[in-house]
């Protein structure tokens, strides 16, 4: 399977500050996504990270709050801006397929970044 | 995307077979049924996908009746390490690489 790493693995931040989460993939992939998983909840898609263009955000998520960069086909960052305790979640990076997929639409997920905002 | 309904939680003991049923009454002709598994503190991972009848791999079996309005994920002889959340997803295969949309999932707890 595709190897996806995220940094940091966890962080505790103060209200009002920002945190940038990095996602690194061991191979070039076309599609990269960012999800949020609040405590005890399912995953919610934040946005699709597009290489060379602005990210595509889902309803309820905006670029000012969650700016995303994707400078190349193996790397992306998600910034959680002006954080509040409600942003405490696990943030997961995900990629589609590439050469490792059992099925062409198989998605691989990173280990997640556990964010706690005080 | 077809809406899915699955039990919120299930309990089992080691060595038992576990069957998790997912309802998807509005499944479309070109939709597949896919199951993902999420262990605590990890991202989800693909376990099985099917269109109709039965699919089996080294991890699980997937049973899909002829009307495809439901499906059953079967885990043979579960162990403690099968404790996880299991997500049923229904949708067409890789529409231009669109992201998976997750429902609530079923939390399976396996005890000794």
Image (cartoon, coloured by chain):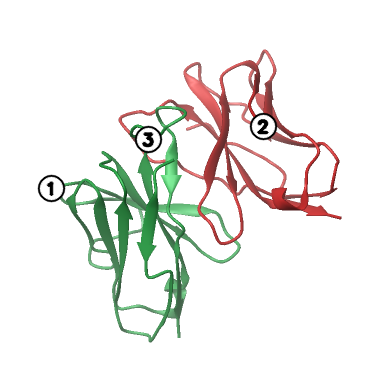
Chain colours: A green, B red
Q: Do discs 3 and 2 share a chain?
A: no
User: Disc 1 marks which residue?
Assistant: A52
**Residue receiving disc 2:** B23
In which quadrant of the rendered image does the N terminus of chain A lie? top left
User: Tag 3, which secondary structure?
Assistant: loop
Q: Residues within 10 Å of mark 2 (few under 14, many from 20)?
A: some
Residue at screen point 78% across, 47% down: B79
Whether residue B11 is situated above or below residue B69 in the rendered picture: below
Q: CA distance from mark 3 to mark 2?
A: 27 Å
Marks 1 and 3, how far apart in space?
20 Å
Q: Nearer the viewer, mark 1 or mark 2?
A: 1
Identify which residue, B11 or A56, lies in the foreground. Answer: B11
Q: Earlier in the sequence, mark 1 or mark 3?
A: 1
Q: Judge from the rendering whether residue A96 lies leftward or rightward of residue B88; answer left or right.
A: left
Q: Nearer the viewer, residue A50 or B58?
A: B58
Q: Quadrant of residue A100?
A: top left
Mark number, residue A97: 3
Residue at mark 1 to residue at mark 2: CA–CA distance: 40 Å
């Amino acid at each position: 399977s595709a190897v996806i790493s995220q940094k940091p693995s966890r962080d505790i931040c103060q209200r009002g500050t920002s945190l940038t989460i990095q996602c690194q993939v061991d191979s070039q992939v076309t599609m990269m996504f960012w999800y949020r998983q609040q405590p005890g909840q399912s995953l919610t898609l934040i946005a699709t990270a597009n290489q060379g263009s602005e990210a595509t955000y889902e309803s309820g998520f905006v670029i000012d709050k969650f700016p995303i960069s994707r400078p190349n086909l193996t790397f992306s960052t998600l910034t959680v801006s002006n954080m509040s305790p409600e942003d405490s979640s696990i943030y997961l990076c995900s990629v589609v397929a590439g050469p490792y997929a059992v099925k062409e639409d198989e998605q691989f997920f990173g280990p997640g970044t556990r964010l706690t905002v005080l | 995307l077809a809406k899915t309904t699955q039990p919120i939680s299930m309990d089992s003991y080691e060595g038992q077979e576990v069957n998790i049923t997912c309802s998807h009454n509005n499944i479309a002709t070109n939709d597949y049924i896919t199951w993902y598994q999420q262990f605590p503190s990890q991202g989800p991972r693909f376990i099985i996908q099917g269109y109709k009848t039965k699919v089996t791999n080294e991890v699980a079996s997937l049973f899909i009746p002829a009307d495809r309005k439901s499906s059953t994920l079967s885990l043979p002889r579960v162990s403690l390490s099968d404790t996880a959340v299991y997500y049923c997803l229904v949708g067409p295969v890789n529409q231009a690489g669109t992201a998976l949309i997750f429902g609530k999932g079923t939390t399976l707890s396996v005890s000794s």
